[in-house]
Amino acid sequence: MKKCLLYTLLLINAFTFKALGQQYILSGHVTDQRGAPVSFVSVYIRNTTYGTTSNEQGVYKFNLSPGEYDVIYRYVGYKEQIDHITISDHSVLHNVQMEDEVFKLKAVNIVDKRNRDTAASRIMRRVIAKREFYLKEVNTFSCAVYVKGVQKLTGAPKKLLSNGVSKVLDLDSNGRGIFYQSESISNYNYKRPNKVKEITISAREAGISPTFSYNKASDLQANFYNNLFSVPGLSSHAFVSPVAKNAFSFYRYHLEGATVENGHTIDKIKLSARGDGEYSFEGYIYILEGDWRIYSVDVHLTNKVNRLNFVDTMKISQQYIPVEDNTWMPASIQYDYSGDVLGFKFEGYYIAIYNNYKFNVTFPPDFFNGEVMRLDTAANLKTADYWFKNRPIPLTAQETRDYQKKDSILRLEKSKPYLDSLQKHKNRILILPYTVFGFTATSRDNKDSLYVYPFNKTLFYNTVQGLGINLKARLSHTSDDFKTLGIIPNLRYGFADKLFSANIHSYYIYDLFHEGRFFLNFGSDVLDLNNVGTRSLYFNTLSTLLSNNNYVKYYRSDFGDAGFMRELSNGILFTVSLSYANRTQLFNTSYAHIFKSSTKHYTSNNPLAPDTVPANDRSILFPQNQALTLNASVKFTFDQHYITRATGKIYLPSKYPTLTVNYRKAIPGVFGADAGYDFVSADVSQSRIRLGLLGYSSFKLSAGDFLNKKALYFMDYNHFLGNQGLTFDPTYVGSFHFLPFYQFSANSFYFEAHYQHNFAGSLLNHIGFMRKLKLEEVIGANYLTEKNDMNYSELYVGLQRFIFRVDYGISYAGSHKYLQGFRIYYGIR
């Protein structure tokens, strides 16, 4: 009898737990009073943090256990609706018709002499007064985030559609279709003021990756309680929040009216910009009266007013919900955008849904270790059934077809016949791209690749070697665990000096997660006496033949070196190498001219010889010598943030300066080595330091000295990244505009400083016709002092647009003007 009773109780418990674990689907269609679907309505369970939104067609879906629920439906412009729904033992279809929201003025608004809406101003001043409280209200939280992105082409030029573009982008005959969609589910963790960690559980994408994307939950963490609001990639400057402490300098506010939702009074405030409005949003902000907090946001930016990149319009919508103890958090945020590039019209959106908030979370001491995002190794392997059960926003019919079509294409693309055909097609040599960018061939599985350096780096001319050939390629192999072996053979021959050089550079990346690698290099080569770089073979060829400026000075080296690099801990990168070299001075052997009428003469290959010395000068810069050199450096990146993928780390810029300490020692007497010295230096640098609305700054400071110099040769000096000629490379903040390549090279203590500021258009934006050009203003200064040449300085101004830049500057050697003029950059180095 006891056994029978026990079995009965176990059976009852089993059925009970099964019933409790069973979930059913609550779904429906949200429409307005005219029967039209309402897209992206926030739908969530009252007194919980569980919610979703409707899709573009107004369809929503929930997975719910049996029970009774109060379901809230909310969207800007519509009256909030609360429906009581019971889930028993089956799925429920519950359609909703939302009523238009009516905002009524509580009293007649008073407009003062300055045309200010005093009612709206009073409301916003109260909100701004509580801004910092709400910014710091939550110390820690975690939540689940679903991010979805869809990008569509809505039109394309007919001529381009007929040339195969429509097939590549999978468009219809009118140039319409989805060309990219993605979705991800993550656990998002936050600790005030700025520590985040996102763990992506699942991710999926289909189509051609767009120019910009917001696939991370952190990309869509839009907090209007911050004074400045930044959208990654959207603009070179930030925007002022409507509730910023100085918002009244940028906005006018108008009270449209108020309504009552669920016992709360909601004020609707219209935003309009003061001045040209470049840093301001337009649209509406909804305020929870009494609490004076943001209830929802519905604002937009336009390219015409706000000077946006890539898009013509960007709309930002955000919904807040009460979560716990009168704490409100975002339920969803959405970016909608549209644009037109060369006749291709596009539109799209990214939306984030936040669920299951947990506050006052106690994280382990080392949880926030710099890793801001980690992708689970199986994140990209989830099945279609998994996504159907777990995505909170149901796919539209068009999105479902697009996924199915692209999945079918992907399966086809993995077939052997297709891969063989694709490999043959993509490994074709195209003359024009090869000339500038080189040629790449890959194996079918992309584990093996061959890169041949471009033609403009293959054929060269200089006065030391004459016409020459520099054949260079890179071969690499990646194993199944993503370890990579690379070999770079290089053959070089000069027809005038008859010197043949051959060398091999190689590397082995063994630890993708700590930048672990070994490298081994050996052979012979013709090298620049300035080891930090002067002009490329391509630009030196042009300047030599076209203007008789043989700027670069060369020597020959027979060398071998081996080294090791690894991250000791997050933000500390250690590098060490040992090299042996036999160095020989070279002299000019060729004096060819394209323009015979030129009266300008080439200079000696001795960089310290004056210009008056003939080009065939044989003065001794250094005797043939050998050097055994130990190099070591430690790079400290403070508060280093990174993203972890299966293929390794992706490092993100730090908001703090980077410190690099270098030590170089030449060891005399070993293997007949002649050079003997000790050199130490330290560099501090940082790029893109944002200065509010005034753009961003970059700087570099460097200092060093030779502790001893028993036997020091010119190539062992500390050299600087100078510039001679009309073109220059502004991509590195530690470079000069006018500094000669060799004249200021230091064999004693030196100090150099570089500063550059990009105003991001904040000055020229006030000039009407210049505004449309979207130019960015640049100013900067460079400074160098060392024992032999004291107080060299440069000042410059410039204009930049994408990869194009023009600078005008002036330089001084001491108190005397040295050089001045223009420098240009157009993306080729």
Image (cartoon, rainbow, N blue to C red):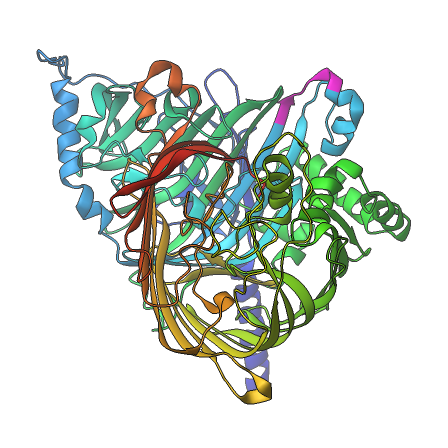
Residue 19: x %, y % from top left: 55, 60
* Quarter-of-image position of residue 51: top left
Toward the bottom, the furthest residue is 670
Range shown magenta: 153-159
Location of the C terminus (image quadrant): top right
Residue 119: x %, y % from top left: 13, 21
Location of the N terminus (image quadrant): bottom right
644 left or right of 522?
left
Residue 224: x %, y % from top left: 29, 39
Residues 108 and 730: in front is: 730
Residues 513 and 208: in front is: 513
Residues 274 and 443: in front is: 443
Q: Residue at x 71, y 67 (%)?
A: 503
Q: Is residue 77 visible?
A: no
Relative to residue 157, is residue 536 depicted above or below?
Answer: below
* Quarter-of-image position of residue 572: bottom left
* Quarter-of-image position of residue 677: bottom left
Q: Residue at x 57, y 69 (%)?
A: 14
187 left or right of 560?
left
Relative to residue 572, is residue 769 depicted above or below?
Answer: above
Q: Residue at x 39, y 67 (%)?
A: 747
106 left or right of 824?
left
Toward the right, the furthest residue is 417
154 magenta-colored:
yes
Residues 39 and 156: in front is: 156
437 left or right of 151?
right
Count of numbered circles in the view: 0
Q: Is residue 196 visible?
A: yes
388 magenta-colored:
no
